[in-house]
Image: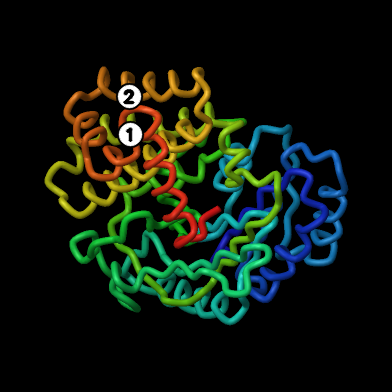
Amino acid sequence: MKLLSVAIPCYNSAAYMRKCIESLLPGGEDVEILVVNDGSVDETPKIAKEYEEKYPNMVRLIDQENGGHGAAVNTGIREAKGLYFKVVDSDDWVREDAYLEILDTLRRFAGSREVLDMLISNFVYEKEGEKRNKVMRYRHALPKNELFTWKDVRHFMKGQYILMHSVIFRTKLLKECGLELPKKTFYVDNIYVFEPLLQVENMYYLDVNFYRYYIGREDQSVNESVMISRIDQQIRVNKMMFDFYHEHLSEIHGEKHRRQYMYNYLEIITVVSTIMLAISGTPEDLEKRKELWRYFKEKNYRLFHRLRYGLMCGYTNLPGRGGRRISIDGYKLCRRFFKFN
């Protein structure tokens, strides 16, 4: 069995995927690199095949019809043979010294009776044109270099959460929790780091800057104009997360820290949805914002009320044109500070 499976979802990634794959090769044969070609029409499968032939014990090309990022991640999980599982997007890469330290940590748990469900590390926003890159760390919220549970999780700052870039899951946990990301939908990475938390018990935080998250292409899903053009997909993901939290609330009712973390994550995704709809400002999108809140209200009034009138969502839903302007200005201030898109 491999120690770590790394899935690289690829769609027309020929221009940048080599850097991603090359950054993962230092892991050696303890790592399997699953290049999931999601129906590309460029040189992506040819490049992946080249690496598969050169590193037959490490790299495997998996071809599939185009189904979107979520479908590629689903395939990676299904095909993974490693004890642990990581997603690295094809335009991102990892830092070698941190990578080797992470593998050493995983080896230690692989040979131990202690079960590690989720390993967390830092990621770096590699933003085009920035002289200094923002590092997303968790040292204020999580114990370092020790196995811990939800009871040990401290307070996260607003706007800072454990993202796909931060996590390595135990593969069996992902397979057994029934995670199935929707096809042809962007922003499913939020579901990926939300639904499995219901099964996660033991965690470990390694304070190393492992994942390098590239931001700069105009067609990236986190680009503001692109997010607005795909707002229906953002809303779909938001509703799925609300439904999941609503349906499983009784299972985590007595678990204060897990429940609060999952609520806070749902809250920030709802803020993003409502702000993007406000920035768009078209009558159609403003109606979609009203419909989103109606959906929540009908599903779970108490949860709706807590979200709608809480500090974050309350601030991003101030009434009238002037209220929307204040909300948008506050969002843009946060964006400049956190550098998230």
Residue 200 to residue 281: above or below: below
261 or 2: nearer the viewer: 261
**SS type, badge 2:** helix
Which numbered tag is attached to residue 77? none
Label 1 residue SS = loop
Image vertical order of residue 255 relative to residue 102, above or below: above
Quadrant of the image for the N terminus?
Answer: bottom right
What residue lies at 45% left-to-right and 57% top-to-bottom?
169
| Residue at image mark 2 | 293
Residue plotted at (75% across, 41% down): 63
Q: Viewer-proximal residue, 176 or 232?
A: 232
Which callout, 1 or 2, points to the residue nearer the camera?
1
Say which quarter of the image contains residue 73: top right
Residue 27 located left or right of residue 147:
right
Residue 123 x %, y %: 51, 67
User: What amino acid is labelled 2 in the image?
Assistant: Trp
Query: What residue lies at 32% left-to-right and 24% top-to-bottom?
Result: 293
Specify whether residue 177 is in view: no
Residue 292 rendering spot, x and y as whole percentages:
38, 24
Whether residues under marks 1 and 2 lie with C-beta atoms below 8 angstroms apart, the answer is: yes
Which residue is at a point 60% across and 37% down the rendered structure image? Answer: 71
**Number of numbered discs visible in the structure rendering:** 2
Q: Position of residue 262 (x, y in %)?
A: 29, 46
User: Counting other residues with Cα less than 10 Å from the Cα at mark 1, is it few (<14), some (14-19), or many (20 or more)?
Assistant: many
Q: Amino acid at mark 1?
A: Asn
Image position of 251 (left or right of 115): left
Q: Which comes before the other along the chain, label 1 or label 2?
A: 2
Q: Position of residue 154 (x, y in %)?
A: 23, 65
As measured in the structure, the alpha-carbon distance from the residue carrying label 1 to the one carrying label 2 is: 10 Å
Name the colouring of the figure: rainbow
Which residue is identified by label 1? Answer: 317
